[in-house]
Image (cartoon, rainbow, N blue to C red):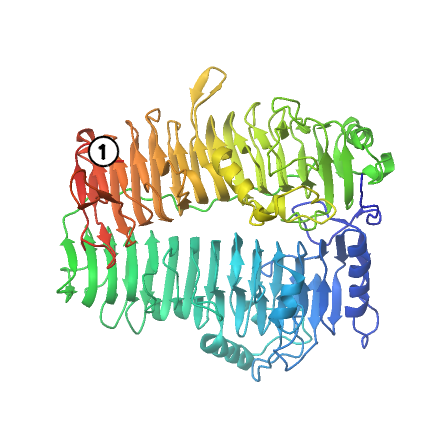
């Protein structure tokens, strides 16, 4: 048995000046250099290199000023952590301050911090002491992935950079703050950042599944109010800063993305609040979703210069621009969808849509000038159930608008609609209809849980070692010791630890590895390798968690799992009682992932559970109160992209694209399944390749057989036989906001399937679907189903249910409407966009538009026998 025999030095708790959401555990603790002339980069780099050779860990930089006089390479699995508090709080200048002096005047060189796979920066303040808003000087990116002067050939030799984390940081005055790699990367995690950039705040480009950006605060005020400098900015400098940012800065820039999840984005005082653009080396822009944003006092709040056809969905956002709130340039058949958003501008139209498709539902247009509140020179436009708060021209559509619907809107004064779309199919009707609205309140996730007792136990002190064939006894001794003494943290250093049987985590105990955030199996860190249970699907789980216990920063890999042939194993993790948590746990290749279904799970909290499950992913049920799931994803590359020492499977040479694993998952994997849950809050879940992406089902809990009550914000199913499989819901129903799906072309049952067994209320707000598939939705039974505002690039909708509302759909694919040969005739039949049985003939259909690629040029629904 091969083993990684090196591990990091013994970890210890660190006392911090400011409060933290978890106990800070570091392998190395450093102080600033006492010299005022010497830099700190070289000695920080030396510690990084030493820790990386031992498998990774955490370096804690104690409060004080550090001089970054040359670029620092943050190697795989190493996190730098400091002492920090939000810049809105008192004494924020007394934390860990990184004074960057390197590469003054040279923006085209290495970032100050180069992040490799699974590395992290958190609780830090970055400051450029030689920057002056009166005479801004270029600098390289503060944080980036590229290792050598943006030379793509060199970077390609390094490989894809996965899971870089920047969390809880202040960027006081960067020229350009954070960027992803300039060639290919994925799974970035940029969370809770405060920035006053002169050029760019956060730039995300060349991203595969799936990047996350949340709690971003871009404003001039963080530099204006910074007290960590020798002197604060004077009024002249503050005025120059605001003027420069308004003319030059972009808060968030988004380029080529497979998917991106954004939440709580706040930008003020920039040229572009959010800027969407194409790949510099190609033609592709972003697609993704954004829930809750406040973009204000920018020249253009949202500048959508380029967006791909799948589009971007915005829900619960406010856009305020001096010129435009939203500017959408001519970019083909791209789509922007806005639900429950507000718009205002000072000098021109609030919204300018010049091509593609845009829809506005439940929105408010507050102020505007120019041609109209919404001005569409070209494209397709839907404005439904919106409020216009000024007695000016409300909507103008020029002659290149080919499809539109203006329905059930309310106006200050009489409606002022200018419709010059003479050749387009435009429906205008001011009769008031009732429309459902999504819940746009913030999710308000609770703080990350941790053991009540602050005590640290290292598994090494109990005899654990990567050189052992079986670490079960040593690990369990450490866990039991912590449990008997009232709880605490059992620490696992970097290394490969094998197990011949399972573990039980006692109440009040957390099993914790080296990782402080998301991590991919490319560099597994604290790695647990179970050997037991092969071939026994119903066997004992590898890890069982007693009530009020948790796991954090751990990776689990089954060394005898053959994903090419798929071998059954028991569940990897099972809770035994309520109050359990999983924080940043990666399950590389489990047959069955996490079972929070079998036993009561009240108060569960799961944050960034990742991996590549084969048969079952995350199952949750039996909770009478609120439960939390945040930022989870299942992608096949967690099983495939592993270090060479682990990847010893006999895989046929022609399976280089992992087709066998993907096919197995599409035939078998139930990724996320939710049962009897009183109030489940789910955000940012994603799966690539599954049989059922997200399933709701009934479960028996204390004699009550019920489905879930839940709100799901931003779930995506990519290549799923079922995107959403709704079998049962609770008495309060389920609500999906900003969902995306690409149904599997070959074995697909339905993108959204509501089955006969479902009797409650199901709502989808602001959705998108793409790929060539059998259908976008298949709706059966008596459930009350609302699908409001969707970009359908998939297939037809079939309705057999009697209580369905389909509002504001857009149908965009030239070949998506299945063409079938009619028997006995050499003709083809176009399947309608919506197909209804007699029982479903009262289905509400409002505000539907089609793309200019559609053969008929108009929306079509048919009542009659199903032709599926």
Task: Name the spot of residue 332 as percent of width and height, x first.
Answer: 32, 65
Q: Is residue 145 visible?
A: no
Q: How many marks?
A: 1
Counting from the top left corner in percent of width and height, residue 530 is at 72, 33
Q: Is residue 125 above or below residue 135?
A: above
Q: Residues within 10 Å of mark 1 (few under 14, many from 20)?
A: few
Residue 583 position (above or below residue 265): above
Front-most of 49 and 229? 49
Q: 219 and 418: which one is in front?
A: 418
Residue 549 placement, left or right of 57: left
Q: Which residue is mark 1?
A: 866
Say above or below: 244 vs 31: below
Asked where in the image residue 193 lies, by quadrant, the reply is bottom right
Considering only vertical position in the picture, is 545 above or below 461? above
The quarter in which the C terminus is drawn is: top left
Q: Is residue 412 visible?
A: yes
The residue sitting at 82% across, 68% down in the picture is 33
Q: Is residue 862 left or right of residue 621?
A: left
**Picture quarter with the N terminus:** top right
Q: Residue furthest bottom?
A: 135
Residue drawn 78% across and 44% down? 493
Report the residue at 72% width, 59% height from top: 75
Q: Secondary structure at mark 1?
A: loop
Give 312 or 775, whichever is nearer the viewer.
Answer: 775
């Amino acid at each position: 048995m091969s083993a990684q025999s090196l591990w990091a030095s013994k970890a210890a708790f660190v006392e911090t000046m400011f409060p933290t959401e978890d106990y800070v555990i570091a392998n190395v603790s450093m102080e600033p250099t006492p010299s005022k002339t010497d830099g700190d980069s070289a000695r920080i780099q030396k510690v990084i290199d030493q820790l990386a050779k031992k498998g990774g860990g955490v370096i804690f930089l104690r409060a004080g000023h550090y001089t970054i006089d040359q670029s620092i390479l943050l190697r795989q699995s190493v996190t730098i952590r400091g002492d920090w508090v939000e810049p809105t709080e008192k004494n924020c200048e007394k934390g860990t301050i990184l004074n960057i002096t390197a590469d003054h005047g040279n923006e085209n060189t290495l970032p100050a911090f180069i992040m490799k796979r699974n590395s992290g920066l958190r609780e830090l303040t970055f400051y450029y002491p030689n920057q002056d808003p009166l005479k801004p000087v270029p600098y390289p990116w503060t944080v980036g992935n590229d290792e050598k002067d943006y030379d793509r050939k060199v970077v390609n030799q390094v490989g894809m950079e996965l899971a870089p984390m920047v969390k809880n940081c202040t960027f006081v005055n960067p020229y350009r703050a954070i960027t992803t790699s300039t060639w290919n990367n994925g799974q970035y995690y940029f969370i809770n950042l405060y920035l006053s950039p002169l050029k760019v705040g956060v730039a995300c480009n060349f991203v595969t599944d799936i990047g996350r950006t949340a709690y971003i605060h871009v404003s001039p005020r963080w530099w204006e109010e910074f007290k960590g400098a020798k002197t604060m900015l004077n009024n002249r400098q503050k005025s120059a800063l605001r003027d420069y940012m308004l003319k030059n800065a972009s808060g968030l820039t988004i380029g080529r993305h497979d998917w991106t999840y954004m939440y709580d984005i706040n930008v003020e005082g920039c040229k572009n609040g959010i800027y969407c653009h194409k790949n510099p080396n190609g033609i592709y822009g972003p697609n993704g979703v954004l829930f809750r944003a406040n973009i204000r006092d920018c020249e253009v709040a949202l500048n959508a210069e380029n967006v791909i056809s799948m589009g971007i969905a915005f829900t619960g956002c406010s856009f305020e621009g001096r010129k435009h709130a939203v500017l959408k340039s001519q970019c083909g058949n791209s789509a922007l969808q806005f639900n429950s958003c507000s718009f205002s501008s000072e000098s021109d139209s609030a919204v300018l849509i010049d091509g593609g498709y845009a829809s506005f539902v439940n929105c408010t247009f507050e102020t505007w000038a120019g041609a109209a509140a919404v001005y569409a020179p070209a494209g397709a436009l839907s404005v439904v159930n919106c409020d216009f708060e000024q007695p000016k021209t409300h909507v103008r559509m020029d002659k290149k608008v080919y499809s539109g619907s203006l329905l059930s809107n309310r106006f200050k004064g009489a409606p002022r609609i200018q419709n010059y779309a003479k050749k387009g199919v435009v429906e205008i009707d001011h009769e008031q209809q009732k429309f459902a609205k999504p819940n746009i309140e913030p999710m308000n996730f609770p703080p990350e849980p941790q053991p009540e007792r602050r005590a640290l136990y290292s598994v090494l002190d109990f005899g654990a070692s990567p050189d052992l064939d079986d670490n079960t006894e040593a690990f369990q001794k450490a866990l039991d010791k912590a449990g008997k003494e009232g709880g605490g943290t059992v620490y696992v250093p970097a290394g490969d630890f094998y197990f011949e049987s399972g573990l039980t985590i006692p109440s009040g105990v957390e099993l914790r590895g080296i990782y402080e955030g998301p991590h991919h199996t490319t560099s597994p860190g604290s790695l647990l390798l179970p050997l037991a249970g092969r071939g026994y699907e119903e066997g004992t789980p590898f890890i069982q968690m007693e009530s009020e216990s948790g796991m954090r920063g751990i990776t689990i890999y089954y060394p005898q799992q053959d994903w090419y042939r798929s071998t059954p194993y028991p569940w990897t993790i099972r809770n035994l009682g309520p109050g359990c948590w999983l924080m940043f746990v990666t399950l590389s290749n489990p047959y069955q992932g996490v079972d929070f279904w079998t036993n009561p799970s009240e108060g569960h909290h799961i944050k960034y559970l990742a991996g590549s499950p084969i048969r079952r992913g995350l199952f949750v049920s039996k909770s009478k109160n609120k439960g939390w799931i945040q930022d989870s994803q299942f992608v096949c590359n967690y099983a495939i992209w592993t270090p060479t020492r682990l990847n010893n499977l006999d895989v046929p040479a022609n399976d280089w694209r992992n087709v066998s694993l993907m096919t197995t998952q599409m035939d078998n994997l139930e990724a996320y399944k939710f049962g009897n849950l009183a109030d489940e809050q789910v955000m940012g879940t994603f799966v690539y390749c599954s049989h059922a992406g997200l399933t709701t089902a009934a479960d028996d809990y204390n004699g009550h057989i019920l489905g879930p009550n839940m709100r799901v914000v931003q779930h995506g199913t990519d290549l799923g036989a079922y995107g959403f499989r709704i079998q049962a819901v609770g008495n309060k129903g389920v609500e999906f906001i900003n969902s995306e799906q690409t149904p599997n072309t070959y074995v697909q049952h339905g993108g959204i399937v509501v089955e006969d067994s479902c009797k409650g209320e199901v709502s989808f707000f602001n959705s998108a679907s793409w790929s060539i598939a059998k259908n976008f939705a298949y709706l059966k039974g008596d459930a009350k189903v609302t699908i409001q505002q969707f970009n359908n690039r998939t297939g037809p909708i079939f309705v057999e249910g009697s209580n369905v509302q389909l509002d504001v759909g857009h149908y965009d694919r030239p070949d998506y409407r299945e063409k079938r040969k009619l028997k006995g005739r050499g003709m083809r039949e176009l399947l309608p966009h919506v197909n209804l049985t007699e029982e479903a003939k009262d289905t509400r259909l409002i505000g539907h538009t089609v793309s200019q690629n559609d053969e008929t040029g108009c929306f079509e629904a048919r009542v009659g026998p199903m032709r599926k």
